[in-house]
Amino acid sequence: MKMKCLSVILISLNLLTYSQEINWQPLGKENKVINHTYYTLSYSEKHEQAEWVQYTLKSNYLNPNISRTDHFRTDPFIETRSAELIDYKGSGYDRGHLAPAADMKYNRIAMSESFYMSNMSPQSPSFNRGIWRKIEKQFRDWSYKYGELIIVTGPVLNGDYLGSIGPNQVTIPKWYYKVALDPTNYNRNVAILIKNTGSSEDIKSFVVSIDYLEKFSGLDFFYSFPDEVESTFESSTHISLWDWNVTYSSKPRTKTDVNRQVIYPTDHIQNSGNIFRTNTGKKYHSGNCRYLSKSKIPITLAEAQERGLGPCGVCKP
């Protein structure tokens, strides 16, 4: 009995240490990984959208005074170019967010980047504005209650589609998924698999196990976990570990609240090292780029993105 208790304690300690170092990204078919400031994605050029988007949701840090920008635009970090606004024009499909704008209310940078077209997928209006929005809010409410959640979401690009739209032939997915995991309790996880159509069904009716979603989608979630850890929580659903009645309202802050110092999470900010800008250019560069001959101004990646600067195509910082 003592040996069994000791074994449980050691496993718990190992999981705690491991969770601090783990790579939360799934393994997909493309694995063309792009790191934005507060979310990461893998872009599928074939389908002109992300095969997965991964981010950590910390709802207690969200600022309700940050408003939507609706600045939909191509993603400058996609070398092969992302989908464009014209692809969706007159298509009858919404530019559906994968990482929701409401989950990116940390600051102006996070909100702005959530409108890159690489973060969009063609969604039926009744789906995007209905059940999908409801699911997004449910996950956000859970984050308020349980603390940070690891989120992975995206379209199912397994061959079962509804056609395509636009000059770039953006694939219309038939299915979408959303996965949440509590990094302090791996058993508190949930996987949603749902059709790209409106629905009045309860969210619980779309819950599947992570194992089932992996087989259905072709993705490998939490693949960097040791196999013995994965097997402990991916094989079954854990509906009872979630509070399905929890709800939080996001109210704008008062003037007093706005004046208080708010520290936003920075552990997801990506910086590729020393990068620079010129006085007048529209790009950022590595230190040895020939375009820096006249001026060489240090800048962080977050600052470059807030200024709307894209990566130099010559030095490829």
Image: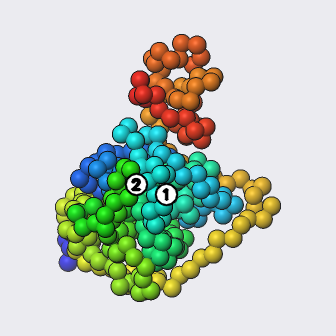
Residue at figure coordinates x 42%, y 49% from the top left: 83
Dot 2 alpha-carbon crowd within 10 angstroms: few under 14, some 14 to 19, many 20 or more: some
Secondary structure under tag 2 reads loop
Quadrant where the C terminus lies? Answer: top left
**Hey, which residue is sitting farthest right in the picture?**
255
Assess whether mark 2 and mark 1 are in contact (beta carbons under 8 angstroms): yes
Residue 75 makes an appearance in the image: yes
Compared with residue 10, is residue 126 higher up or lower down, i.e. above or below? below
Residue drawn at (39%, 76%), measured in percent from left and top?
197
Residue 89, labelled with which disc? Answer: 1
**Foreground of the two, 109 or 73:** 73
Q: Provide residue 225's location: percent of width, then percent of height.
A: 25, 58
Pick the front one: 127 or 194: 127
* Mark drawn on residue 166: 2
Q: Nearer the viewer, residue 74 or 222?
A: 74
**Residue 42 horizontal/vertical position (percent):** 34, 50
Q: Which one is earlier in the sequence, the residue at label 1 or at label 2?
A: 1
Give me the residue at 46% from left, 18% from top: 289
